[in-house]
Amino acid sequence: MKKNIAVAGTGYVGLTTGTCFADLGNRVTCIDINPDKIAMLERGEVPIYEPGLSEMITRNVKAGRLHFTTDYKTALEEAEYVFICVGTPSGVDGEADLRYVRMAAESIAKTMTHPIIIVNKSTVPVGTGDWVADIVHRSQPKPIPFDVVSCPEFMREGSALYDFMNPDRVVLGSKNKDAAEKVAQIHIPLRTRIIVTDLRTAEMIKYASNAFLATKISFINEIAAICEKMGADVNEVAVGMGYDKRIGPQFLNAGLGYGGSCFPKDVKALEHMALVQGSHPALLRAVMDINRDARRWVIFQLRALLGGQLNHRKIGLLGLAFKPNTDDIRESPALEIARMLQYEGALITGYDPVAMGNASRDNPELRLVESAYELADGADALVVCTEWNEFKQVDFVRIKESMKQPILVDGRNIYEPDMMQELGFIYRAVGRGSTFTNGHEFAHNGN
Ligand code: UGA
């Protein structure tokens, strides 16, 4: 049945959640305190790049199901649910900074006029649901009943719409089972498992899920580092491991490590929570260390291939977004690599199909070009930082001809080492031992 839903925050999570709920037939009002963002959305412009989102917004605005406002009062007027989807950036010690959650909770408390269910989708430390309830109680001008339900999101940027509409599960946590049931109702059209638990457990499920996925990535990157020394191929190792149902094939792509607005921040925040409570989060620390090393790997490769000196070397970065199908550059390995190389005096050029605007705001010294071919022109080396599909199809003969020297460092393992060597590239990939040693000979000698 059609419901009236308000969504606070129009970042990736809020905009996707609001738009998808509208697409499921509900009446949704998205709120943001930033008037420029709301003005953009009202003009039909979308402040972020997410495949399919712009079309879905237009469709639902036209159908009269999706609205935007800066005013909580208007949004909450008839809402039965209000989703909190605001940012929780990292604080100075890695803790989650909850100032936007607090602001949203206070605004809800001050403007609600009837009982409402507050659904928290922002990733927040365990215990925040109780804290939100407390803020709302204390900020209400007169007491009106409400419930807090935690409903962590598991969407990935780049496939957010698909993930919202086809979730593996929906997790709901609340002190009040009836409130959780009411939130379950609006998820029924998604036809998925709905897990109802208490607030703190739901909040922990989110951190544990992200930390586990980050651990899988760091695990395969550690194996990659060993493969590289031993003459084994980590891509094939991952395939061989992935067929074991207990392991599974996903999140075993070795490369430059995880970036984005979630894994780096959430692993850090979980470590911080553990430390504050007197735990010793050794595994989480190792996961972060390995992720840092994964980016440095590029610098070591380039130093080795370019005679130790990177000063004045022209290096091209293929891809700047933290992963394909997004313009998000937060914690992007490419931008950290650019900074490290610039620090050593290298001249860095970048190309990305959609993230160049964001990249140039982040790093004004970065030179930007319009294609992989322009990037190759006169370059001492190219580095694949993001595995965009269009990089898999380039004309390598043309690329090689225009480079000063044919050095290709593949930070995402998207090419076949044998093919690249046949084409005449000096090719390095992550954890693909045969590109470093003569793998077969090494293995035989070892026996
Ligand atoms: C991640 C989770 O996958 C979502 O379930 C979660 O909802 C979201 O965080 C969040 O907490 O909001 P996202 O950050 O969009 O989603 O991106 P992922 O596709 O998970 O990739 C994260 C990073 O890991 C990327 O930098 C990617 O390149 C890297 N990665 C991923 C690898 O290096 N290897 C892999 O095998 C997989």
Image (tube, helix red, strand yellow):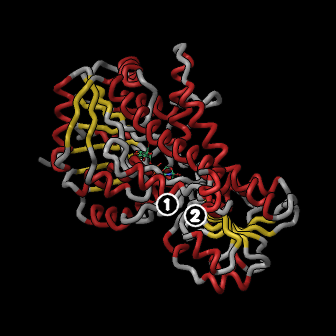
Residue 430 in sight in this render: no
Asked if disc 2 is less than 8 Å from ligand 1, the answer is no
Asked if disc 1 is less than 8 Å from ligand 1, the answer is yes
Judge left or right: residue 402 versus residue 71. right
Q: Mark 2 and mark 1: span between their CA atoms?
A: 7 Å
Of 82 and 417, nearer the camera is 417
Q: Which mark is residue 355?
A: 2
| Position in image of residue 78 (x %, y %) | 23, 41
Residue sitting farthest toward the top: 278
- Residue at 84% across / 61% down in the picture? 310
Q: Quadrant of residue 136?
A: top left
Describe the element under mark 1 as helix, strand or loop: loop
The amino acid type found where label 1 is placed reads Thr
Q: According to the image, label 1 marks what residue?
A: 326
Of 356 and 291, nearer the camera is 291
Of 210 and 15, nearer the camera is 210
- Residue at 25% across / 26% down in the picture? 197
The amino acid type found where label 2 is placed reads Ala
- Please report contact status of discs 2 and 1: CB closer than 8 Å, yes or no: yes
Residue sitting farthest toward the left: 1
Crowd tier of the residue under label 2, counting other residues whose Cα lies within 10 Å: few below 14, some 14–19, many 20 or above: many
Q: Quadrant of residue 92?
A: top right
